[in-house]
Image (spheres, helix red, strand yellow):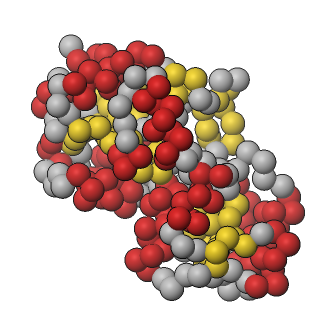
Amino acid sequence: MVLDYDLIISDVDGVILMEGDPIWDNINSLRQMIEHGKKVILVTNNSGFSRVLLSRQLNYLGLPIEPKDIITSGLAAVLYMKKSWDVKKVFVIGEEGLVEEIRNAGYEVLMTANAEKEIPDVVVLGLDRLVTYDKLSIGMRCIWKGSKFVVTNMDRLWPAKDGLRLGAGALASALIYALKREPDFVAGKPNKWIVEVAMELTGISDLKKVLVIGDQLETDIKMGNELGADTALVLTGISQRADVERTGIRPTFVIKNLSELLS
């Protein structure tokens, strides 16, 4: 089945890893795809990942993925900001991977104590498992005073070993509700922007040769469907078979794990 595709675009959380722990059936299947000459790009809404550290972890697990073949929603947000605005200072509500991407782009990351004094050009919000009420409030006030508002992704939920947790979208919704306004840009899935970045990097433009793999109907599968690519919902993360009827979002394939794509 997978032999029909040249580019495999796979999610990470719920497909390859579950809160850092490997999902071995899927890892082994992706490795076999690479061995069969398929280009595998990881596209994740999790902005907390450092692409370098994630690449090292995956290579240790036997999955040869280079940092350049990983696109996080944090990287997608940075690329959009570079394209769209003159940005110098950024206030970040997010984890180290997001901060790393923003600093690598040459932007100054304002600390909490300085954010309201200097007023950042952009407030960027991503998944932040250590977020505080004060940090969210500072971000809200900066946007109120004129900062652009960028969200890495609007995932409601995030899969963890002990069950579902709040996603970045749940945090962003607090600011959206308080400010009574939508973000200026949402970088991650289901926005097609993040996949268009992946396709540009690989030089593959024929959507008939692209397969999008993910564990969430509302992000991974919705994005792939809207892009016009084939999609595979893998039941190792958040969405389950019954959710297909409930949401009306229909993947090309529904599979228990990625080994079914190799049969």
Name which quarter of the figure residue 21 lies in: top right
Front-lying residue, 252 or 214: 214
User: Where residue 97 appears, x then y in whole percent?
Assistant: 59, 51
Q: Quadrant of the N terminus?
A: top left
Residue at 18% from the left image edge and 55% from the top image edge:
203
User: Where residue 63 appears, x then y in whole percent?
Assistant: 38, 27
Residue 187 in sight in this render: no
Tell me if residue 216 comes above or below residue 258 in the rendering: below
Residue 8 in sight in this render: yes
Residue at 78% from the left image edge and 53% from the top image edge:
131
Front-lying residue, 188 or 62: 62
User: Where residue 235 appears, x then y in whole percent?
Assistant: 45, 23
Name which quarter of the figure residue 232 lies in: top left
Residue at 47% from the left image edge and 25% from the top image edge:
60
Front-lying residue, 226 or 92: 92
Q: Quadrant of the C terminus?
A: top left
Name which quarter of the figure residue 65 lies in: top left
User: Where residue 24 appears, x then y in whole percent?
Assistant: 45, 16
Tell me if residue 54 comes above or below residue 94 in the rendering: above
